Image: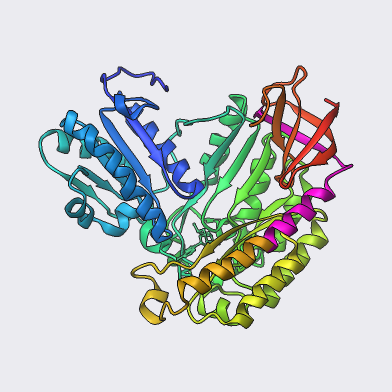
Amino acid sequence: MVAPAIELNGKKLFLESYGCQMNFSDSEIVASILTGTGFETTRDFGQADVIFINTCSIRDNAEQRVRARLQDFKKLKKQNPGLIVGVLGCMAERLKAKFLEEEHLVDIVAGPDSYRDLPNLIERVESGQKALNVLLSREETYADISPVRLGSNGVTAFVSIMRGCDNMCAFCVVPFTRGRERSRDPESIVAETRELFNNGYREVTLLGQNVDSYLWWGGGQKKELEPETVHAALHHTLPADEQARYTTFADLLEKVAQIHPDLRVRFSTSNPRDMTDAVLHVMAKYENICKYIHLPVQSGSTRMLEKMNRGYTREQYIDRIESIRRILPGCGLSTDIISGFCSETEEDHQETLSLMEWAGYHFSYMFKYSERPGTAAAKQFADDISEEVKSRRLQEIVDLQQLLSAVRTKEGVGQTYRVLVEGPSKKSTEMLSGRNSQNTVVVFPKGDLKPGDYVNVKIDRCTAATLIGTVVSA
Ligand code: SAM
């Protein structure tokens, strides 16, 4: 339960989030806006006066999960007709007023850029109307809002650094549901992160759909700048006085890393088309920037990558990983892979498997292609790979990843890692859990340690994805 400093209005808010980390981070902004008007948050939806579901549209099954969850609230609404149910986020943005027509129990539909309007939308519903705001903004970054940390362990937190996406990957609904790319004022990012550190947090994850394309020059949508200027600024090739007007992701990362050496810094998601060596050099320079990169590849076939409009070839992706290995030896690496994108052949699929093997990913998020209405792929290409073939290829990808993860985890046995203690381990109250710099979970005996401490752990053994060891020095 989070109690706001201002006068309470006696009402309780239940918030549930689906999908990416960005959505979980947005829910913390929503909680901040509503606690600012007197709401208290509750973890029990049976107690709530307002229920908000922050939704995801990335694949059809994510949307189906939300629809099923709404059924759970139907009974509650029958018992308590005053209960307000709102749908927020990407699914709200995608379906707009259609949502109100299709799901009669829903009172509010609010897109990702309209959360400041939620108190008004609630008032509108209290006066007997349905309420909708799905306007996408040119500037909104919620920079001035201090998020209420929901379900926090008090050690790790997300900090949003930008919103929207301009990449227009053919399969992806994000540019339509989250709008165009906007970066957040670096000073507000540093201030939020410093406050987290002063409040005992020891790790932040900087969040954006494509963090490498972060660019601050005073605010606004990136598409307002000339593409050549953006490219030169991101690659630090402008004349020094001009470059000084811009803050790139490499600059931002350095500013955040300098807050305190005991503050760990992570980030997600990187995009191979924009990830510069400048970012890798900043990572190498600061011990407290974790040596882990999530670099979605989507496919190992240049033909598929072109069709997906990813903006890089197989060879260019390999070149990025070679840079990572050269500048950051031992860096942890993970990826996202889609099986069965439009017209994918067995040869394309084999190229994905061979690239996975070459990269030796520590971890992957693996998906079957799901056609999303309104995307370039939905408009231009047939979704022509059968469910059966998509599933079989996905299974082959999952099986290979399991082998690769097992190899990577085993490499950790005998090593000593610096671990940030996050909390009790899942399996034993006598053990604690944290992660090493490469993002692998490490479990070790509790001793006198507490969340937020750093410890050195010598790894004695492992399971498929977890390292288990003993504390060698604090
Ligand atoms: N912005 C990141 C990028 O482009 O690399 C991640 C975006 S998305 C929130 C996370 C992942 O979902 C993507 O990397 C992709 O693998 C997957 N995804 C996106 N659209 C999809 C679709 N239509 N079907 C299946 N998977 C999809």
Residue 107, compared with residue 82, is above or below; it is: below
Side (left or right) of 231 relative to 10: right
Residue 349: where, in percent of width, then height?
61, 76
| Residue in the foreground of this view, choosing between 299 and 455 | 299
Q: Quadrant of residue 9?
A: top left
Residue 115: where, in percent of width, then height?
32, 42
Side (left or right) of 327 relative to 253: right
Residue 240, compared with residue 119, is above or below; it is: below
| Residue in the foreground of this view, choosing between 216 and 355 | 355
Side (left or right) of 22 relative to 115: right
Q: Quadrant of residue 43?
A: top left
Name the residue located 68 percent from the left edge and 74 percent from the top edge.
316
Name the residue located 30 percent from the left edge and 52 percent from the top edge.
92
Residue 25: where, in percent of width, then height?
47, 41
- Quadrant of the image containing the C terminus: top right
| Residue in the foreground of this view, choosing between 414 and 402 | 402
Q: Is residue 204 magenta?
A: no
Residue 398, compared with residue 351, is above or below; it is: above
Is any part of residue 262 visible from this angle? Answer: no
- Quadrant of the image containing the N terminus: top left
| Residue in the foreground of this view, choosing between 359 and 198 | 359
Q: Which residues are magenta?
A: 400-424
